Image (cartoon, rainbow, N blue to C red):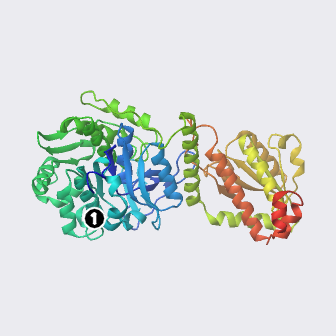
Amino acid sequence: MSDARRPAPDLAVAGIGSMVVDRIRRVQRVLGADQKASVQPFAGGAPVQAFVGGVVLNHLGWAAALGLRAGVFGKQADDPEGRFLRAAMDRLGIARDLVLDGSASSTAEIFVDDAGGRAIYMAPGATAETSAEHVRRHHARFVARARRVTSEVSQLPLAAALAAFALAREAGAQTVLDLDLPPSQAVPALGSGEELDVLLRAAHVLKPAKSAAAELFPEARGDALALARAARSRFGNAAVLVTDGVAGCAVAAAGFEGRVAAPAVRVVDTTGAGDAFLGGLLAGLEAGLGWREAAALACAAGAACCEKLGAFPDDPRAARERVLALHEGPPVTLGPLPAARGATFGADAREALATMDVVLGELAALREALDPAAFDAAVALIRAAEEKERRIHVTGIGKPEYAARYAASLLASTGTPAVFLHGTEASHGSAGQVAPGDVVIAVSNSGETEELRRAVETVRALGARIVGVSGNPGSWLARTSEVFLHAGVAREGGGLGLAPRASFAAEVLVLAALSAALEQARGFTAADYAARHPAGALGRRARE
């Protein structure tokens, strides 16, 4: 690209590489081959929680939270996972130049143990499909907008990373590489050994994980500083920073060689700590810090990441404040907090959209965790009751009452006659609508609500059979129910995270899914639907 056509750099950093939906499960310990253990539920009972992740997207997120204008480019898919990731990019103001023609967006299954250790199984999807030709054809102008260009040895083919770095050199941008995988895993999975060697030499700044560097230089005997010196000597980088877990990092650069300690924190999850480290390093370099001071800021970012589940800074203000609180170097002046990408709206609207993203993410995680056999059992129980001319009742207390009213109406309109049972009135006479053999669908997020418990005990004494819908599989309601349908979420959304938003949506979704299963089981037709909807637009559509 000629200088006349080259746009002025307006991005501090642009990155290409893994953008991943991390599905995290908590376990007591990470297992070896042929071992079994139970997954520990999150608060609310959900066995899996979805987070924004990926080596490149994580470090761009932390860089953005620390005041850098960041951008991401590459290949992705136009699927729910991709939309989840792009919404997170937009919330942090990360510019994007993405081609949405991939087969699937990247996902990772992550198991985190009680000590914060983890095992990660990756499905690279669109990232692994990115070619050098794709980078050259679609992203040259975007790369030219950046002062630094980052990439990774993790999921992206080496040829694509080399193409990105070639565009960066042409534009006069510095290159930064995260060597996340040991060479024995990168080759031949991502490309050839020759391509890896060229890529490592092409990096102005090289950040290897200690395990990756140790495989390249076994003579260093795992000493992080010796590894950094050996890498810089072989590859000719301006600087090499080897991350060393809780010990911090080792730096080999012009003007400074040495170790930089990490702040001591309570480790919750080490996933993405190295990515956050790189985001902090980029922020330090952009602020004009020397290598020692920039590494100290990087260590603070890595430590802050370890204090929470998930690697991406969903709350950039809190992430930034925590990094500065942990930073043990001299005071640093950072750029402003990121504004939502393309935002012409205020903080209230951003909170609304962020809450929607949380709810959508929780529903996606719930879908992964649902047990189809539970729906089969619920359908069988309800259909057997109907064959004996028994009735269906739906009940709930508080916000679940509204979900119960909706479910009773939806079931009735789709071929399963059902009525709402008022939970608090059930022990004051309304349980009289329940006869032996009837089915009562009881809805409660906690599964422990005292009023619902009294209602369920009352109708059980009258001979009712119970289908429980709750976010807590260990609750009293789950233990009491003949059939249990899980509707758990880990996060509610909203500033306080207390009001039932995602949990209410989960209850409604599970009940709606049950109604669809019953509709299918009874062979409910459009004519049947029209008979129950003689008026209105839906009735007209059913009769067409």
User: Mark 1 falls on what kind of element?
Assistant: helix
Q: Residue furthest top?
A: 331
Amino acid on which disc 1 is placed:
Leu
Q: Residues within 10 Å of mark 1 (few under 14, many from 20)?
A: many
Residue 511 pos. (x, y %): 71, 56
Please tell me whether residue 422 is drawn above or below residue 464 in the rendered image.
Answer: above
Residue 158 pos. (x, y %): 27, 64
Which quadrant holds residue 196? bottom left
Q: Residue furthest front?
A: 4
Q: How many marks?
A: 1
Which quadrant holds residue 296? top left
Residue 296 visible to an observer of this rendering:
yes
Apparent side of residue 537 relative to residue 105 in the rendered image (left or right):
right
Out of 450 and 49, give the one closest to the viewer: 49
Residue that mark 1 sits on? 158
Residue 10 pos. (x, y %): 34, 43
Residue 113 pos. (x, y %): 40, 51
Which quadrant holds residue 303? top left
Residue 481 visible to an observer of this rendering:
no
Quadrant of the frame with the C terminus:
bottom right
Apparent side of residue 138 relative to residue 358 in the rendered image (left or right):
left
Apparent side of residue 423 relative to residue 180 in the rendered image (left or right):
right
Apparent side of residue 436 relative to residue 80 in the rendered image (left or right):
right
Quadrant of the frame with the N terminus:
bottom left
